[in-house]
Image (cartoon, grey):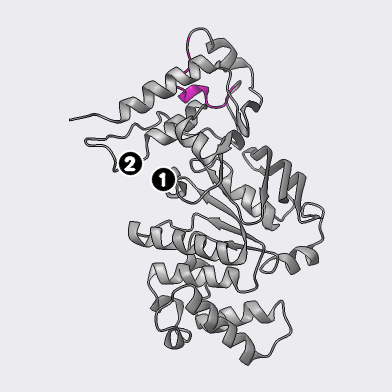
Amino acid sequence: MTFLFVKDLQVSFQTEDGLVRAVDGVTFDLEKGKTLAIVGESGSGKSVTSQAIMGLHTGRGVKISGEINLDGTDLVTASDSTLRSMRGNSMAMIFQDPFASLHPFYRIGNQLAEAVTAHRKVSKKEARAEALLMLNKVGIPNAEQRVDDYPHQLSGGMRQRVMIAMALINGPELLIADEPTTALDVTVQAQILELLAELQAEFNTAIILITHDLGIVADMADEIVVMYGGRIVERAGLHELFYQPQMPYTVGLLSSVPRLDSVGNRMLSIGGQPPSLISLPSGCVFHPRCAAMNAGSEERCKSERPDLRDVGEGHMIRCHLDEQERTAFATKRLAEVFISE
């Protein structure tokens, strides 16, 4: 059963340089206990989408339209008081920089306890007990001593675990993890993702995982949404997207992911730079960087904006190329990534 439903979400910011269409017509849904990964390069609209769900966009220059329905509540039209009561309670977010998110002058135990008392009528002693319990649950060693530490006394991985504890301490049904493993070494990355999966299994939490790296979601996501230029360009189940990618941009992301199951593997980057959200290219916004565009499709790719269309069960793409052209490009490009001995 659908728990979160986002329909035709549009988020724009009025700036001195012009109107920034950060999110343009994004639609997806998510069930409890499932993980949706939203991937794409920086500036593709991933974080803006997640912040819109949390109701964090404020100010006169911001315009939000569409629908964000969380278990029957429309978050786009909800009042500020409703959103405040839901944040940290019904929904929570793990930000990519835990050091910036934790208050440097307060002990981590006090910060966790405050998250409890903000939403529930419990004593300070009970709140501290819950904070200690959650620190143990997320794997903080010597939690009884660490509970009185300041953020600067913890490693990057430990601070991220504290952020996860803070996000989950009130048992939210929706957890948004925005680049939760950025700046962490590979071993700690794996530990954090494994921890999220374990806690999801325990609490049946719906998770949105925001990342630019397809590699870290391979063992965690049930479905993947690929964003580019503020729009969804491909949406598919994990297996379909990894083994039958259809959108040339997705193929480019996959070909730049390092793998350990091939000798002499190399990575192929996507040429060029992501587009400016103030002045997007005409036609398909990816066409200036698209290596699959050919003479037969060039005029259409440059002039006509493609719609998001079905190409299989639960598989949608935004591309003018026909199936044969897409498959041939994906097969050739991904084969080039691997060079045998």
* For residue 289, above or below residue 293: below
* For residue 73, above or below residue 233: below
SS for dot 2: loop
Q: Would you say residue 63 sits in the magenta stretch?
A: no
Asked if residue 210 lies left or right of residue 314, the reply is: left
Displayed quadrant of residue 280: top right
Label located before the other in sequence (1 or 2): 1
Which dot marks residue 41? none
Magenta stretch: give its range.
Answer: 284-294
Using the rendered image of the protein, determine whether residue 124 is visible from the camera's viewpoint: yes
Please tell me which residue lies in front, 157 or 80. Answer: 157
The residue to which callout 1 is attached is 215
- Name the spot of residue 21 as percent of width and height, x first: 65, 38
Residue at x 68%, y 58% (from the top left corner): 54
Using the rendered image of the protein, determine whether residue 106 is visible from the camera's viewpoint: no
Please tell me which residue lies in front, 106 or 292. Answer: 292
SS for dot 1: helix
Q: CA distance from mark 1 to mark 2?
A: 8 Å
Amino acid of disc 1: Gly
Residue at x 60%, y 74% (from the top left corner): 169
- Name the spot of residue 308 as percent of width and height, x first: 65, 28
Residue at x 71%, y 41% (from the top left corner): 10
